[in-house]
Amino acid sequence: MLNISTQRGCHLLCCYCTYPLIEGRANHRRDPDAVADELAAIQRRGVKHVFITDAVFNLTNDHAAAVCEAIVRRGVKMTWTCFLRPKNLTPELMTLMARAGLTHIEFGTDSFCDEVLVEYGKNFTFADIAHSTELARSAGIHYSHYLICGGPGETPATLETGFENSRQLPGAIIFALAGMRIYPGTPLFVRAKREGRLPADADLLEPVYYISPALTEAQLLQQLAGFKQRSSNWIVGPLPPEFAGLAERLRQRGVVGPLWEYFGILQRMS
């Protein structure tokens, strides 16, 4: 599996994110035909799967559709994974992405609770998340959701709301991360400083994580562990050691791309 980028820059306002600082807020897009040509070139070298590393592949639907149309036009027969935002997706775009080779979606969802999504600087709701998930399911694409649990606005009640909402997402693999890492220059950094959550001399080279004042780290980890016990689709903490052996067997059989769709199956068996 190799990586490819189709665009740089992100204008979204996620409170913790460094992409606008690193890549800028202006969106710089590659020519879709150039992307398709690059994919064709690496396909000739034997690559079967790529990960599109754009911060958000569907930052604009027009660009995502143009890239997919170019891939189809070029006759590239390669599968791929990308990060998607669960907002503004349409049946037509999802079908086109699947036709162009999309097999795995990693949704940058962050929370399944509307109150927390507002605090995180997201401009979508759980209704958008559920709609996007259903589009992926209908198109036969594997999908996962990444959550950052315990950030601004999080409480035991919002975590429970998020878990109950997750039951409306059949087949989703849910990666639940505890705490929100603080990076310089982000809105979260400003908030943490204002709340006195950072030492004056903190350089942040070593990770420092924000956890909502309504939670302790121990409470957060305990609640997430409970969700994992209640649903095999929730991936919390390290994967079981058995997964390394399963992954090796799958690779030997020629399975390419991410393998996280097997995580839930393994947890149910363990």
Image: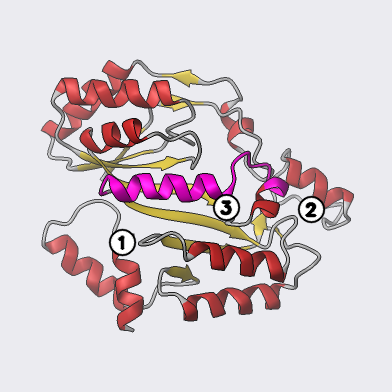
Q: Please provide percent x and percent y for residue 30.
A: 38, 18
Circle 2: element type: loop
Report whether 231 appears left or right of 198.
Answer: left
Query: To which residue does mark 2 refer?
Result: 202
Please state the horizontal and vertical placement of residue 74, each as a whole percent of the image.
16, 21
**Spatial separation of the CA atoms under disc 1 and disc 2:** 39 Å
Please identify the quarter of the rendering in which residue 72 is found.
Answer: top left
Residue 46 in view here = yes
Q: Are marks 2 and 3 in contact (CB under 8 Å)?
A: no
Residue at image point 72% right, 42% down: 184
Pointer 2 local density, CA inside 10 Å: few below 14, some 14–19, many at least 20: few
Q: Is residue 45 above or below residue 115?
A: above
The magenta stretch spans which residues?
118-140
Where residue 220 sits, quadrant-wise, is bottom right
Assign a secondary structure to mark 3: strand
Q: Position of residue 230 (x, y in %)?
A: 48, 79
- The residues bearing labels 2 and 3 have C-alpha atoms spaced at a distance of 25 Å
**Looking at the picture, which amino acid does disc 2 mark?**
Ala
Q: Could you tell me residue 100's position as x and y percent? A: 23, 32
Of the numbered discs in the image, which one, if any, rests on residue 36?
none
Residue 206 can be seen in this image: no
The mark found on residue 261 in the picture is 1
- Quadrant in which the C terminus appears: bottom left
Above or below, comparing residue 170 to residue 77 in the picture: below
Per the model, the C-alpha gap separating discs 3 and 1 is 19 Å
Q: Nearer the viewer, mark 1 or mark 2?
A: 1
The residue to which callout 3 is attached is 110
Which tag, 1 or 2, sits closer to the chain's start?
A: 2
The mark nearer the N terminus, 3 or 1, is 3
The secondary structure type at the circle numbered 1 is: helix
Residue 221 painted magenta:
no
Mark 2 or mark 3: which comes first in sequence? 3
